[in-house]
Image (cartoon, rainbow, N blue to C red):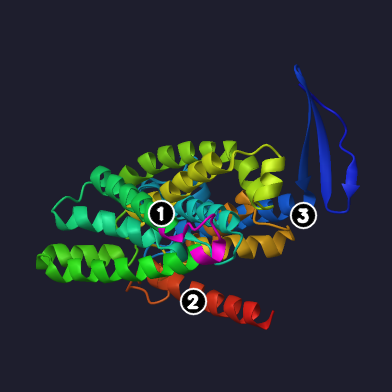
Amino acid sequence: MTVAQSPVVDPGYRVVPVRLAGGRISLRFGLRAVLVTAVLVVVALAIGVVSLATGDFVVPIPDVLAAIVGNASPRAELVVMDWRMPRVLLALMLGAALGAAGAVFQSLTRNPLGSPDILGLDVGAYTGALLVIIAGTTAAGPVAAAALAGGLLTALLVYGLAYRRGLQGFRLIIVGIAVSAMLASLDTWLILSADLHLAISAAAWGAGSLNTVGWGQVVPSAFVLAVLWSALGLLARPLHATGLGDDAARALGVRLDASRLALVVVGVALTATATAVAGPIAFVALAAPQLARRLTGSAGVTLSGAAAMGACLLAASDFVAQHAFAPTQLPLGLVTVCIGGMYLIWLLIRQARR
């Protein structure tokens, strides 16, 4: 495979003609989008390094970097690699997953409010996991499977109720808000009806937290997210095409129904994975795609930019949750709700002015 020199077709985009054995294709990408995404990745990693260095036992950043490559003292390696690294990695991975899930649903609905938070998918995943926890099972596998099942069933319910001779993004959002409210009421009733110890555990988990995670959650989460990211990469073209409208997508040869179903399944799986590990984390999926779109100057949401922004938001929120009121640690979900709530108010005011 050879890549020819890439001509600039407009101030913001570059086309790369790629010659393959069976023909030739052209790759088009935005220079600004690539640069902004790279900067966001660097910022997310920098937040992770600072998180590894900060705590009751302060580790200088050079020692943190030495511990990562295995050249630090045993004490520094214990603190950095065993105690703090799993939490930092999960914050980055789950933030990227939520950002990508938000990009999927905002592209499908063609609405900045069309995220798993608003559509009730994270509440559905929480309901599924809650049923398993209250039944007395706290193992990661059953909880994750129940969260995925709850998210998929909620997506099916919302999709079915919103479908009327086609699917409109605004109707989907309204139905999602209603279903989310009903499921939230059901969750409250389940917690109030459960055994006291299980109810306390379920309520604490439902606030969203990374306080108890370890390497046992990192490895399976990384494997599942790698599979989902690979599937999302294959679905990137139909995702971008659906953002142009149904007629344009059909003209480009996209099978709309099959593509939408696959994208919904992957988007729900990304949300459910984050919910199964850390509990319901609100507003990251809502805010990350739109913030990334404004920074990149793209006409629509981009998967890579949204994922990088999601990683930044969740890593920063987790840092605030750990250290804002140290030694007391706040629930991670509380911090993201505060940040996301302010963003949502700004977004609603901006939309109303239009």
Nearest the camera: 286 or 213? 286
Q: Residues within 10 Å of mark 1 (few under 14, many from 20)?
A: many
Q: Amino acid at mark 2?
A: Gly
- Taking the spot 12% from the left edge, 65% from the top edge, the residue there is 194
Residue occupying the point 53% across, 43% down: 257
Quadrant where the N terminus is found in the figure: top right
Identify which residue, 333 or 133, lies in the foreground. 133
Percent x, y of residue 333: 39, 68
Query: Of discs 1 and 3, which sits in the foreground?
Result: 1
Residue 276 in the image: x percent, y percent? 33, 52
Residue for badge 3: 32
Q: Mark 2 vs mark 1: which is more N-terminal?
A: 1
Neighbourhood count class around disc 2 (C-alpha, 10 Å): few under 14, some 14–19, many 20 upward: some
Q: Looking at the image, is mark 2 or mark 1 nearer the viewer?
A: 1
Magenta-highlighted residues: 161-171
Residue 88 lies in what quarter of the image?
bottom left
Q: With respect to residue 345, does 110 lie above or below?
A: above
Residue under pointer 2: 341
The secondary element bearing badge 3 is classed as helix
Label 3 crowding class (10 Å Cα cut-off): few <14, some 14-19, many 20+?
some
**Numbered tag placed on residue 155 in the rendering:** 1
Relative to 206, residue 12 above or below? above
Instruction: State which tag comes first along the sequence, 1 or 3.
Output: 3
Q: Earlier in the sequence, mark 3 or mark 2?
A: 3
Residue at position x 50%, y 72% in the image: 340
Quadrant of the rendering where the C terminus is positioned: bottom right
SS type, badge 1: helix
Q: Residue furthest top?
A: 21
Tell me which amino acid carries mark 1.
Ala
Whether residue 250 appears in this view of the structure is yes
